[in-house]
Structure formats: structure tokens, C-alpha cells
Amino acid sequence: MPLLPLSPVRTGGKLARSSGDTLEIDGLIFEVHRSDRRKTLQITVERSGELSITAPTGVPEWDLASFVEEKLLWIHTKIEEKARLQKRAPIKEFVNGEGFLYLGKSHRLRLVENQLVDLCLKNGRFCLRASSAHRARDVFIAWYTRRALKWFSQQVAEHANRMGVQVSEVKVQDLGFRWGSFSADGRVSFHWKAILLPPRIAQYVMIHELAHAHHPDHSASFWTKVEQHLPDWRTRKSWLAENGVQVEGL
């Protein structure tokens, strides 16, 4: 993320610098997003540790800096929480008896000698062909991707019309630190890891992304739209924030 040229921004405390698209204060770098529809300031700490601030179009840069300065303790606390959660993510070894999630339930792995397909879920167990064990991660990702595409396609078909959303395509791919995305051309994408989440949490991810068809930011209007279709979204959102990292260690 380019930071030059940077201009000093006056605040009541720490020195801040701004390049228009970014704001740096107290050693932290924020990506700045502005919107004519935005009424309030909002700071976001991503799971990756990246920082952003969303603001109404006309808010001066020094007001952004002052707002960030007021929230510095909260921001540093959130950054530490994200880092701590990342360290908790388990790394899979693909050995007999190891548990693998699918729609919120853990299924034990069994390595088998004679099997026509690389991987299948049978009688509550994941069965992995032993000869495919050397590429087990790719095999699991391919299996999860196929299942996720089917599951989310059904969910989107059920809810899109109800939410007044025109969806041109449903995709499943590796989205990095995002669970999903909604593009201006009507394509909705989900991370393949979202199929590891419990159904009620995966559904929250889906409703969240469809709501972005109406409100591309996370404004109050956006959350109102989410609440219209998912009244308990706060509980689901909190669960995802606290437990979502547990599905990242494949």
C-alpha cells in the first residue's frame, strides 16, 4: 500500500500523516474509504490485522485522525485479539483419527487403501485414499469447494428474491481473509472455508453478502437490511468473530 507523498495532519495528540487514501497514526496505517451515503465514522480491524476507516465524503482528514486517536486503545486491543486468535488456528496433519469440519460438525479421518475417489464422507467419517495422502490438502479443498458451491447456490436461490437481489453467478474460491464478497455485476462469492462453519453461521455470511447488493458499506442502513432477514445477526456475527479462526488451519 503506497504511503507517499504523506502530509502531516494536526490533531490534539499524536502526529498523524495522510496521503488521502491512507492515514498513518501511532505506527498504524489505515486505508481510508469515503462514501456520500455514509453518515458516521467507522473503524474496521480485519482478521488479517489490516485497518480501514470509512467516513462521509466531506469529513476533513484531521477529524479522521482525531477519531482514530480516541479509539487507539480499542484498536490495539482488537489487533492483539486477532493475533492471539490466529496463533490458535490448528494445522492439519491428515492422519488417521484427525477431525475435519463440515457444516459445523467434526468428522474423523480414515485413510483407506481401496477407494475409487480421492475423498468421500461416509458413515460420518472422511475417507481419504491412502495413495492421495501426499496431496491431501488440495483434495480436501476441492471437496469442500464442490460442496460449498452446491450449498450456497441453494441458499442464495432461496433468499435472493426475498431480499430483492439479482444474482448473476455464485462462486466459491479462496478469498483470503474474507468470508464472502458481492460485486457490482451481481456475482456473489464465498470462501470455500465457509462450508466448514455451522449452517446458521454460514447463512449469516450469505445474508451479509446479499445485503451488500443494497448497501456496499457497513452503514446503519446495511445492518438494518441484515436484521430484516436475520433478526439475531448480532449473535451470529459475534460467534464468527470469536470462532471463525478455528476453521483456518487446513
Image (cartoon, helix red, strand yellow):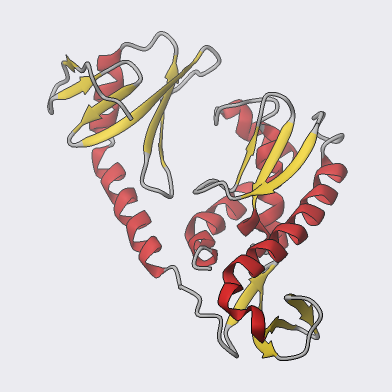
Q: Residue at x 86, y 43 (%)?
A: 157
* Residue 101 position in % (x across, y down): 63, 72
Q: Quadrant of residue 104?
A: bottom right
Q: Residue at x 82, y 28 (%)?
A: 166
**Which residue reaches farthest front?**
131
Is residue 240 left or right of 142 when viewed as pictured? left
- Give the mark count: 0
* Residue 23 position in % (x across, y down): 28, 25
> Along the line of sight, which residue is nearer the eye, 39 or 217?
217
* Residue 185 position in % (x across, y down): 72, 25
> Along the line of sight, which residue is nearer the eye, 131 or 161?
131
Is residue 51 left or right of 196 when viewed as pictured? left
Q: Residue at x 57, y 85 (%)?
A: 98
**Which residue reaches farthest top?**
58
Is residue 171 left or right of 98 when viewed as pictured? right
- Above or below residue 139? Residue 83 is above
Residue 232 in sight in this render = no
Quadrant occupied by the N terminus: top left
- Above or below residue 152? Residue 127 is below
Is residue 12 left or right of 20 when viewed as pictured? left
* Residue 133 position in % (x across, y down): 60, 80
- Above or below residue 162? Residue 127 is below
Residue 237 in sight in this render = yes
> Along the line of sight, which residue is nearer the eye, 220 or 93?
93
Q: Residue at x 39, y 61 (%)?
A: 86
